[in-house]
Image: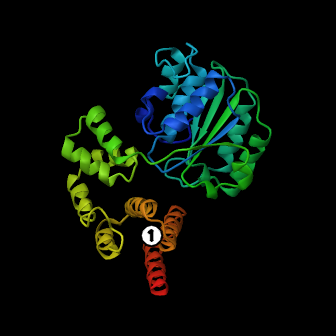
């Protein structure tokens, strides 16, 4: 944010205060109380699925910490709140992989180290939000660790990740963990209808396809090809479950997985379905399925060839079924 923003993320969807964030009441209450009690931790680790409000909550936290009205919710009226929303506040920065890149570099973390040594220019606290923190190179992660070990006063670091285990254990241990959960489907449907004026039927379909992620629901809402959502919905014909129907899933995948993003979308849908089934009826087989799919997602995010990664996943699933039965 400010003139040093290292990521291309748009801030339009982050223009919310704590009271407007839905589905993450536990996380929001912990952060709000830390502001009210003036006992904020020097570093936080926001962990949860993509698109459930981690970045939005981090921005809201930065507003609450620096609000001129001393409002833990952020007043959205003072110069500080407005600057944070617009990405122009000199004491609040959002750092992530550079546009077109896959990793956070050592140079980016070194720049952060130099900037944290300065006192806040306008706010009460300097807030650095490190998006996709697990994408930091090994050098960058070790460099970040030094900052976490000797945190300067008036500085708060917020690390955001989907997978906590991709971070160094020494990094994890120096942060206060804040967990974010999938948002209930009924709540996503309500948000789409009330805030975005989506027709009830479309809101219901998007909520079902979202796998608990409002960000994913909005992504599909903005797509210019509504037939994509309709066709994807066909995969869930069997009473909302695609478990055991990998053939139809990847027949469809072959048509649209011409890029990494499409493949990850499908795998995330699969993970969401497997996760719901596991919660309803836990078993070792279902746990193994989830682990195999998560490993595939991780490989694709690490720039492994998409077709090879999915082929490998299907072979492992086939082997799993053969050994299990």
Side of 249 relative to 150 (left or right): left
Quadrant showing the N terminus: top right
Q: Nearer the viewer, residue 70 or 15?
A: 70
Which scheme is used to colour this image of the protein? rainbow
Q: Is residue 3 visible?
A: no
Above or below, 223 against 58 in this view is below
Q: Residue furthest right?
A: 150
Spot occupied by residue 298 in the image (x, y as percentages of width and height) = 53, 63
Image height check: is 175 above or below 268?
Answer: above
Nearer to the camera, 293 or 59: 293
**In this view, 268 is above or below 245:** above
- SS type, badge 1: helix
Residue 242, by quadrant, is: bottom left
Residue 110 x/y as whole percent: 71, 43
Q: Quadrant of residue 42?
A: top right
> For mark 1, does the 10 Å Cα neighbourhood hold few (<14), some (14 to 19), or many (20 or more) residues?
many
Q: Quadrant of the C terminus?
A: bottom left
Based on the displayed image, in which of its 4 quarters is residue 5 positioned? top right
Is residue 271 found left or right of 254 in the rendered image? Answer: right
- In the image, what residue occupies the spot 21% across and 52% down? 226
Residue pointed to by mark 1:
306
Residue 187 visible to the viewer: yes
**Residue 88 percent across, percent down from the top left:** 53, 25
* 45 displayed left or right of 150: left
The percent coordinates of residue 31 (x first, y second) are 59, 31
Q: How many marks?
A: 1
Q: Nearer the viewer, residue 26 or 209?
A: 26
């Amino acid at each position: 944010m400010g003139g040093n923003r290292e990521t291309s993320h748009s801030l339009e969807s982050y223009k919310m205060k704590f009271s407007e964030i839905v589905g993450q009441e536990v996380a929001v209450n912990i952060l709000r109380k830390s502001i009210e009690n003036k006992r904020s931790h020097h570093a936080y680790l926001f962990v949860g699925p993509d698109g459930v409000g981690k970045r939005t909550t981090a921005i809201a936290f930065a507003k609450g910490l620096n609000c001129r009205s001393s409002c833990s919710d952020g007043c959205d009226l003072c110069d500080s709140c407005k600057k944070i929303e617009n990405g122009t506040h000199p004491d609040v920065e959002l750092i992530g992989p550079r546009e077109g890149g896959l990793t956070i570099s050592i140079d980016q973390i070194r720049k952060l180290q130099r900037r944290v040594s300065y006192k806040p220019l306008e706010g009460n606290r300097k807030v650095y939000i490190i998006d996709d923190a697990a994408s930091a190179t090994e050098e960058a992660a070790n460099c970040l660790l030094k900052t976490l070990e000797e945190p300067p006063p008036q500085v708060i670091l917020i690390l955001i990740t989907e997978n906590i285990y991709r971070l160094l254990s020494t990094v994890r241990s120096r942060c206060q963990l804040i967990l974010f959960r999938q948002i209930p489907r009924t709540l996503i449907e309500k948000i789409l209808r009330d805030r975005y004026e989506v027709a009830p039927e479309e809101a219901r379909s998007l909520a079902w396809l979202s796998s608990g992620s409002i960000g994913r629901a909005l992504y599909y809402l903005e797509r210019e090809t509504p037939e994509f959502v309709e066709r994807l919905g066909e995969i869930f014909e069997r009473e909302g479950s695609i478990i055991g129907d990998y053939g139809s899933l990847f027949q469809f995948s072959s048509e649209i997985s011409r890029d990494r993003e499409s493949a990850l979308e499908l795998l995330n849908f699969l993970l969401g379905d497997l996760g719901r089934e596991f919660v309803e009826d836990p078993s070792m087989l279902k746990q193994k399925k989830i682990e195999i799919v998560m490993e595939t997602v991780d490989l694709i995010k690490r720039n492994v060839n998409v077709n090879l990664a999915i082929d490998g996943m299907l072979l492992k699933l086939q082997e799993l079924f053969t050994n299990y039965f």
